[in-house]
Image (cartoon, rainbow, N blue to C red):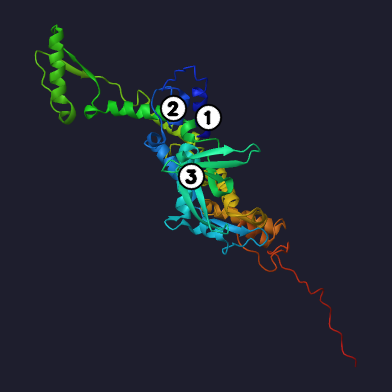
């Protein structure tokens, strides 16, 4: 938003005596109003993009899973959840009186996917403690920087006023590499073009085009009357009825099919293109032509590693920046519990932990830390727990009593 606003200012910049004509179709002007030009001349906005099923599914899958995964505040030393901290409730339970923490993460992630940025205001008490997180319309927030690079935010209110906020008072989630809707607008526009073309093909009952052959020469007016009569009798609700042709005429439908035109494959390829733009496995948006039972677990791991991790990292830092002081950030950290995503591969995971324990590479507390569990007494021993030995020393024969 800040760059688009700056570009618009540069367009209108100049001396008072110079009049510069600006086209309403200029890309900088269009991007300022949330419109992004495409080569196909199809308008792409966040709302229009969400009408594409692949985009709708990708946005819902990513934002929904980011919201569903539980986030907690942990102590760096003990690995225990810090439930008595003011920020824990905002991270794990509820963002405000009418929005859960999960719902807020879903909303802001969705904003970032569609527009590039998601924002929430941090409401604090008189002594600076965080009390609430309230979502802000991303179009009402401007991101700026001081001369030293420190960010600050200008939020426009409904009454036309503006308020300046420090970077610690705005929870800011930026999409990795920008909004996929903006970056992939050409692919989305092409998908819309395919949908429109297929919709027009299936109009009038989905009947293929055909030709009417006549043994006699028909003048131009006769052709128009024949076409008008045919469409009025065999289109719309009347499609599929019995046709009656006069004077030896014959109707021959064209044999072109969707398969011949490779429409089906082209539609699948556009779904894959959108999946690439959102950095999500195609199977996650129900493009299952290449999905098998054997690779589902691997795709889940890929979804976590390649798609969700960048979002979770940004969320963890945004929480820490706004809800923790610099001193608290040295003691505490925010982490998401992701075990349910890779639960299908739990056997392999437990086998790996077991091997690490037996070779002495990890202690019991090391394993518990990986599972976000607090340490236990005696859990720092590297001894192999799967073997037993007699530590009482060698057995000696009893001495005979003196006679």
Report the Cα–Cα distance between label 2 and label 1. 13 Å
- Marks 3/2: CA distance? 24 Å
> Foreground: 389 or 120?
120
- 356 up-or-down from 235: above or below: below
Q: Is 150 left or right of 266, judged from the image as shown?
A: right
Mark 2 vs mark 1, foreground winner is 1
User: How far across and how far down the image is residue 221, in percent?
Assistant: 13, 10
The quadrant in which residue 230 appears is: top left
Residue identifier under label 2: 30
Residue 168 appears in the picture as rendered: yes
SS category of the residue bearing label 2: helix
Q: Which mark is residue 141?
A: none
- Helix, strand or loop at label 3? It is helix
| Label 3 to label 1: alpha-carbon separation | 25 Å
For marks 3 and 2, give the one nearer the viewer.
2
Q: Residue under label 3, please give it.
A: 109
Which disc, if any, is residue 6? 1
Callout 3 touching callout 1 (CB < 8 Å): no
Q: Residue furthest front?
A: 17
Among the two numbered marks 2 and 1 on one chain, the one whose residue lies closer to the N terminus: 1
Task: State the residue at coordinates (14%, 28%).
Answer: 241
| Mark 1, other Cα within 10 Å: few <14 / some 14–19 / many ≥20 | few
Q: Is residue 375 above or below residue 18?
A: below
Q: How many marks?
A: 3
Residue 285 x %, y %: 43, 40
Residue nearest the observer in this picture, 207 or 89: 89
């Amino acid at each position: 938003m800040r760059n688009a606003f700056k570009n618009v200012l540069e367009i209108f910049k100049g001396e008072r005596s110079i009049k510069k004509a600006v086209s309403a179709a200029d890309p900088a002007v269009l991007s300022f109003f949330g419109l992004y030009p495409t080569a196909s001349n199809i308008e792409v906005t966040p709302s229009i993009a969400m009408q594409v099923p692949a985009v709708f599914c990708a946005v819902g899958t990513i934002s929904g899973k980011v919201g569903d995964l539980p986030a907690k505040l942990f102590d760096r030393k003990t690995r225990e959840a810090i439930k008595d901290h003011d920020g824990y409730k905002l991270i794990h339970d509820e963002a405000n009186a009418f929005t859960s923490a999960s719902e807020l993460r879903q909303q802001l992630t969705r904003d970032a996917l569609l527009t590039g940025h998601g924002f929430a205001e941090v409401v604090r008490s008189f002594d600076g403690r965080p009390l609430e997180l309230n979502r802000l319309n991303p179009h009402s927030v401007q991101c700026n920087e001081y001369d030293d690079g420190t960010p600050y935010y200008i939020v426009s209110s409904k009454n036309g006023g503006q308020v300046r906020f420090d970077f610690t008072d705005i929870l800011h989630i930026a999409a990795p590499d920008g909004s996929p809707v903006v970056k992939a607008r050409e692919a989305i526009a092409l998908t819309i073009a395919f949908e429109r073309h297929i919709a027009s093909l299936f109009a009038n009952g989905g009947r293929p085009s055909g030709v009417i052959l006549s043994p006699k020469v028909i003048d131009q007016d006769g052709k128009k009357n024949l076409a008008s009569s045919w469409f009025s009798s065999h289109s719309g609700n009347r499609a599929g009825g019995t046709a009656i042709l006069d004077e030896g005429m014959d109707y021959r439908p064209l044999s072109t099919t969707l398969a011949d035109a490779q429409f089906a494959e082209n539609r699948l390829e556009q779904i894959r293109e959108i999946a690439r733009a959102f950095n999500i496995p195609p199977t996650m948006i129900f493009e299952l032509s290449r999905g098998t039972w054997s690779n589902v677990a691997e795709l889940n791991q890929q979804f976590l590693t390649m798609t969700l991790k960048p979002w979770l990292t940004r969320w963890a830092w945004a929480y820490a920046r706004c809800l923790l002081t610099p001193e608290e950030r040295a003691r505490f950290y925010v982490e998401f519990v992701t075990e349910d995503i890779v639960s299908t591969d739990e056997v392999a995971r437990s086998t790996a932990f077991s091997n690490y324990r037996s070779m002495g590479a990890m202690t019991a507390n090391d394993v518990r830390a990986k599972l976000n569990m607090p340490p236990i007494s005696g859990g720092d021993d590297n001894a192999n727990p799967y073997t037993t030995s007699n530590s009482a020393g060698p057995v000696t024969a009893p001495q005979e009593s003196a006679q």
